[in-house]
Amino acid sequence: MKIGIDQIGLFTPGQYVDLVEVAQARGVDPNKFTIGIGQDRQSVPGLTQDAVTMAANAALDFLTAEERDQVELIILGTESGVDNSKAGALYVQHLLGLNQWSRAFEIKEACYGATAGLQMAADFVAAHPDKKALVFGSDIARYGLATGGEVTQGAGAVAMLISANPRILALNNDSVYRSQSIQDFWRPVYSDIAFARGHYSTNQYIDFFQKVWAKYREETGHTLDDFKALCFHLPYTKQGLKALRKILPETNVDHQQSLLHYYDESIQYTRQIGNIYTGSLYLGLLSLLETSTSLAAGDTIGLFSYGSGAEGEFYSAELQPGFEEQLHGETHQQMLANRRQLSVPEYEKVFSEELPTDGSAYKADTSNEKARFYLAGIKNHERQYRDHLRGNEDAGAESAPDEPIA
Ligand code: COA
């Protein structure tokens, strides 16, 4: 039985900053950002979008009423969670009106979370072929103004429907994975910005890739020649290229050129959006599928997932007949083109705004918020989610009894 990605959707906030302008403001040669790091623009989330709303918005690309009922597993992969206790997946369930006879939870391992969710969902469908799962990778990447990591920030979410007989990509059940506790990147619970040993992290990513790739070759007998394209976790677009270049000599020059061509198609969305942590690998996959005109059913795609801390996984998947008809490329390109450009001072102001943490009421400025699901504010330590279609009612949870909060 084939199991895999039946549907895939994308959301990114409606504002961006141009990284040439950021480079100029920081006194850095813009070529460092656009060529050396490989990033052009960066999505900038205001306080009206968080990991919950972005995930829910990403599923709107494809979710039908029938699928809302068929989903019995809802997994939110995120490292930008909004609560240390309640799973963001429950807010997403409520916002999207998903089946309540389901398991819903959050999963965390840096940028690897969505892959963990995807593989768990595939196992779930293998055990229950008539059921479906929704897996989200949703994050806000924040390192701080004028830091080394600033150019690799971003925000967005990918939503994936996992099912039997998938219409886009069937997993080949050949994963090779490795985990090891290292200190390359972390975010303590008291901080909303991440800390990273950037160069160490970059090198660990490559090291994990080379190790899992070598083991994958050994275990499966496959070589680079068996792959039409490779997709990588993309904290910034140069990172995947550094890993790809390590194994390119394993194939002939023509195939090397072809892999580089597909790599270039896989990074187009990330160049415009930035790092979206857990969703980044799948943003790359989406970019490849929606940009390329030469992929065909039966092509094998390799996927490398990396989460700092650290965990790496390589697996392959096969494109399914008619996959092109399941994509929403035009919608996504319009979403990117319609974003509002912020000047550097505007971006810095948005970046510095914070939700209150002392329980005081906060009402967000939602005048520029076009996305269907958004955060309207915070009251009594509770997030007030809204759905443009449902007006002013709280769309994130059932109404609570009027009882003092302990
Ligand atoms: N023109 C073109 N390229 C230039 C340049 C210029 N004027 N100036 C520098 N570069 C190149 C460098 O040669 C280098 O390329 P290389 O990596 O292929 O050698 C690249 O730009 C980056 O330069 P570097 O000096 O290493 O940048 P940095 O010290 O600012 O650090 C990161 C870059 C990615 C490590 C930093 O942004 C970071 O810490 N990011 C967050 C952590 C992260 O994303 N980790 C990834 C693993 S998950």
Image (cartoon, rainbow, N blue to C red):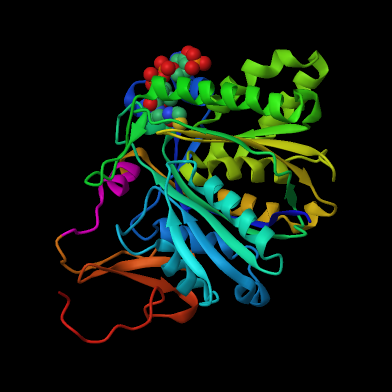
In the displayed structure, does residue 122 sit left or right of residue 387? right
- In x, y percent, where is residue 367? 38, 65
**Magenta segment includes 131:** no
In the displayed structure, does residue 328 sit left or right of residue 14? right
Q: Nearer the viewer, residue 62 or 16?
A: 62
- In x, y percent, where is residue 388? 46, 74
In the displayed structure, does residue 208 sit left or right of residue 25? right
- In x, y percent, where is residue 136? 53, 56
- Is the residue 78 above or below the residue 32 in the image? below
User: For the N terminus, which image quadrant?
Assistant: bottom right
Find residue 198 and report its image quarter: top left
In the displayed structure, does residue 78 sit left or right of residue 188? right
Total labels drawn: 0
Find residue 355 and report its image quarter: bottom left
- Is the residue 65 above or below the residue 30 in the image? below
What residue is rendered at 52% in x and 64% in y? Answer: 74
- Is the residue 53 above or below the residue 286 in the image? below
- In x, y percent, where is residue 28? 38, 20
Q: Nearer the viewer, residue 149 or 299?
A: 299
Q: Nearer the viewer, residue 294 or 322?
A: 322
What segment carries the magenta color? 346-357
Q: Nearer the viewer, residue 402 or 394?
A: 402
**Magenta segment includes 352:** yes
What residue is rendered at 15% in x and 74% in y? Answer: 406
| Residue 339 visible in the snapshot | no
| Residue 67 visible in the snapshot | yes
What residue is rendered at 77% in x and 27% in y? Answer: 222
Q: Quadrant of ligand 1?
A: top left
